[in-house]
Image (cartoon, rainbow, N blue to C red):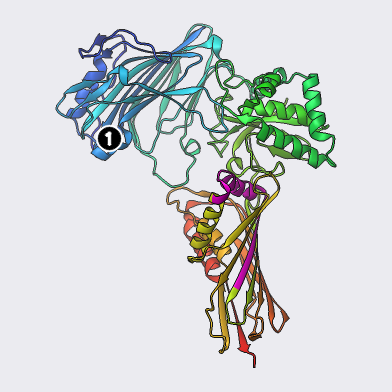
């Protein structure tokens, strides 16, 4: 292994300006200022690093975070040095990103730039700062990203960034906390975090990283590592579950206090009024059952209140008043959930808000209680006899099914006694029934009619695909899918049921005619691949190599009905099948309705399960076996 420079960034007191064409005057852009100063220790470290044995790939050469938690503000000074081995790494990673909250934080960039292998320094021009949103649909955050395109990067060179974030604690909606992720898919070197506090400020920390060594003395937490190995890359990984993190919080609140804090915010947002009374009556008075009333409320909140990120100052984790949400007819997940809570409670239910960490499936890394693990909120009915959860931002999934994207996510129910839980994982997330009727004409051609029924969250996922397309685009999409599944250039006629309205099921119907493929004057030996079942199996092949995988569960019932018409009579209806394995099962029953009519029903069930990495190969082999068996064969004699 190549040696690593052990000298690191020295105390931050030694600051001097670097001469450049950039003025040191502070220019403001979204609470961003620029000083044009750089730390001499930072430059000395960078130059010494380049004189040593440099790595062979992209590496975080140095990271230092010095944080002081005061009574009224938190000052975070961050310095990073990154090594680029190749031009492709520069192409992919040549921008530095700084995350900050525009509502309660001020960002000061002291210096940024590059150092070439021969020591030439090129300083970033602050006029080129780009500020973009980090918001993702469904989630709440007021985080902005300052994008710094580092100038002058060259293979074998470094980038450096030195910045400070000042957080106004009076503007925080929850106690201050910070999560560090001291590992990545590239090597970390010279990693150092120091968090100090003012007298009377109580800091708590928990370090789950074996590579990071921490100590606490006189109100200061210090964590450091000379080298942290890179994580192996893989196709499907929730990195926040894999990276053992360092969490620092102010105070020592239990989860119940976090829940109380959030409950108060939702209670304050829910104010009864004649407007809400009228809305509730309008939505529910003509509905024949409790389930229908829930559906009507869900459809209104999810579709009539459009999603719009509203996580501005004071509302990062705090919902807006429901009257404001109704007036504007928009809101984010918090706002829509507050309205949903108010309406569902009027049905005599016991709805509660539930915080969701959409990028976490494990509870292991929810070490110290804090709100900033979570980025989403849903509503669950907390009654054993009627337990369900609704994502008010999901405009496609029926209320009775938990949307696929959050199943199994880490969550915190907001109720008096609580702790983190994982949201339910359905036994079969992907559930489809396919009914195919094939009738032979007098020339041996075929008319094929197929109805696919998608249920629950699968219906929601398919509906989201269709609803994003115009009617003619839906047909084109369905025809392309058919051609890929069947390996055919045919363009069937398609129709859709429940593609626009939210419902527990969605139907896709197709009809297509095939020219004769068999000699009508000869006996028939017919093979039909169960194409939709095979496609589902192929789509769920696990391509991870280093990490286990949560298989979502698949259930397919496939029915084929053959009408041989006037040409043939059955002589061999095909074989039955009863394949059972620890991973799942595939069965096939054959029913000879008449000498000219055959029905074949296949049932595939693979329950949801965690597949450890050492079982991925045999699991994929099991899927391949099922795919080979997903075909039908029968024989028929030519009629005189």
134 to the left or right of 6: right
* Quadrant in the rendering for residue 26: top left
Q: Where is residue 558 in the image (x, y as percent from the top left)?
A: 64, 65
The residue closer to the viewer here, 489 or 264, is: 489
- What residue did someone put label 1 on? 90
The residue closer to the viewer here, 633 or 3, is: 633
Is residue 449 in the magenta section?
Answer: yes
Q: Position of residue 603 (x, y in %)?
A: 65, 65
- For image coordinates 57% across by 77% down, the residue present is 445
Q: Where is residue 263 in the image (x, y as percent from the top left)?
A: 69, 22
- For image coordinates 70% across by 22% down, the residue present is 322
Quadrant where the C terminus sits is bottom right
Q: Residues within 10 Å of mark 1 (few under 14, many from 20)?
A: some
From this viewpoint, is residue 582 visible?
A: no
* Quadrant in the rendering for residue 287: top right
- For image coordinates 56% across by 39% down, the residue present is 361
* Quadrant in the rendering for residue 432: bottom right
Tell me if residue 215 comes above or below residue 349 in the rendering. Answer: above
Element marked by disc 1: helix
Q: Give the range drawn in magenta.
A: 447-472
The residue closer to the viewer here, 3 or 22, is: 22
Quadrant where the N terminus sits is top left
Q: Where is residue 20 in the image (x, y as percent from the top left)?
A: 21, 14
């Amino acid at each position: 292994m190549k040696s690593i420079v052990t000298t690191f960034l020295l105390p931050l007191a030694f600051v001097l300006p670097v001469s450049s064409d950039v003025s040191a005057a502070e220019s403001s852009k979204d609470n961003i200022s620029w000083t044009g100063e750089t730390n001499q220790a930072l430059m000395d470290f960078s130059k010494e690093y380049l004189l040593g044995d440099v790595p062979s790939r992209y590496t975080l050469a140095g990271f230092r975070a010095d944080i002081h938690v005061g009574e009224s503000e938190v000052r975070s000074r961050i310095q990073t040095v990154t090594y680029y081995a190749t031009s492709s790494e520069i192409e992919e990673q040549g921008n530095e990103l700084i995350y900050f909250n525009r509502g309660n934080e001020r960002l000061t960039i002291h210096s940024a730039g590059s150092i070439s292998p021969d020591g030439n320094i090129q300083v970033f021009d602050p006029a080129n700062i780009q500020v973009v949103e980090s918001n993702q649909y469904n989630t709440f955050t007021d985080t902005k990203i300052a994008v710094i395109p580092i100038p002058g990067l060259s293979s074998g060179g470094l980038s450096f960034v030195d910045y400070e974030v000042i957080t106004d604690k009076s503007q925080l909606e929850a106690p201050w906390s910070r999560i560090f992720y001291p590992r990545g898919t590239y090597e970390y070197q010279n990693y150092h975090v120091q968090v100090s506090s003012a007298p009377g400020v109580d800091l708590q920390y928990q370090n789950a990283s074996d590579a990071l060594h921490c100590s606490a003395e006189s109100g200061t937490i210090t964590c450091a590592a000379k080298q942290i190995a890179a994580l192996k890359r893989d196709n499907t990984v929730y990195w926040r579950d894999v990276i053992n993190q360092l969490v620092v919080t102010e105070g020592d609140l239990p989860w119940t206090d976090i829940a109380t804090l959030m409950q108060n915010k939702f209670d304050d947002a829910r104010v009864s009024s004649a407007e809400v009374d009228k809305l509730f009556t309008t939505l529910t008075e003509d509905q024949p059952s409790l389930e229908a009333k829930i559906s009507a409320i869900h459809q209104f909140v999810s579709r009539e209140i459009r999603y719009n990120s509203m996580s501005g100052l004071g509302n990062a984790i705090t919902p807006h008043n429901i009257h404001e949400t109704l007036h504007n007819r928009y809101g984010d997940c918090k706002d829509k959930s507050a309205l949903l809570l108010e309406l569902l409670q009027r049905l005599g239910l016991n709805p509660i808000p539930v915080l969701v960490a959409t990028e976490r499936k494990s509870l292991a890394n929810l070490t110290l209680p804090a709100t900033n693990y979570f980025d989403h909120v849903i509503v669950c009915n907390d009654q054993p006899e009627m337990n369900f959860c609704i994502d008010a931002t999901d405009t496609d999934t029926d209320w009775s099914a938990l949307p696929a994207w959050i199943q199994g996510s880490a969550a915190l129910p907001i109720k008096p006694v609580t702790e983190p839980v994982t949201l339910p994982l359905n036994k079969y997330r992907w559930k489809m029934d396919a009914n195919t009727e094939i009738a032979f004409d007098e020339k041996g051609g075929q008319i094929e009619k197929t109805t696919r029924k998608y249920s629950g969250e699968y219906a929601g996922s398919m509906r989201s695909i269709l609803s994003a397309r115009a009617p003619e685009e839906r047909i084109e999409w369905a025809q392309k899918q058919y051609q890929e599944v069947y390996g055919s250039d045919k363009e069937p006629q398609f129709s859709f049921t429940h593609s626009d309205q939210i419902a527990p099921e969605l139907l896709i119907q197709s009809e297509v005619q095939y020219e004769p493929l068999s000699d009508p004057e000869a006996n028939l030996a017919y093979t039909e691949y169960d194409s939709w079942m095979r496609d589902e199996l192929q789509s769920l092949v696990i391509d991870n190599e280093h990490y286990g995988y949560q298989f979502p569960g698949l259930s397919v019932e496939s029915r084929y009905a053959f009408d041989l018409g006037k040409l043939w009579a059955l002589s061999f209806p095909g074989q039955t099948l009863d394949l059972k394995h620890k991973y799942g099962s595939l069965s096939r029953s054959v029913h000879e309705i008449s000498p000219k009519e055959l029905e074949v029903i296949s049932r595939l069930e693979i329950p949801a399960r965690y597949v450890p990495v050492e079982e991925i190969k045999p699991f994929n082999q099991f899927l391949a076996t099922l795919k080979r068996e997903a075909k039908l064969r029968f024989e028929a004699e030519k009629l005189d």
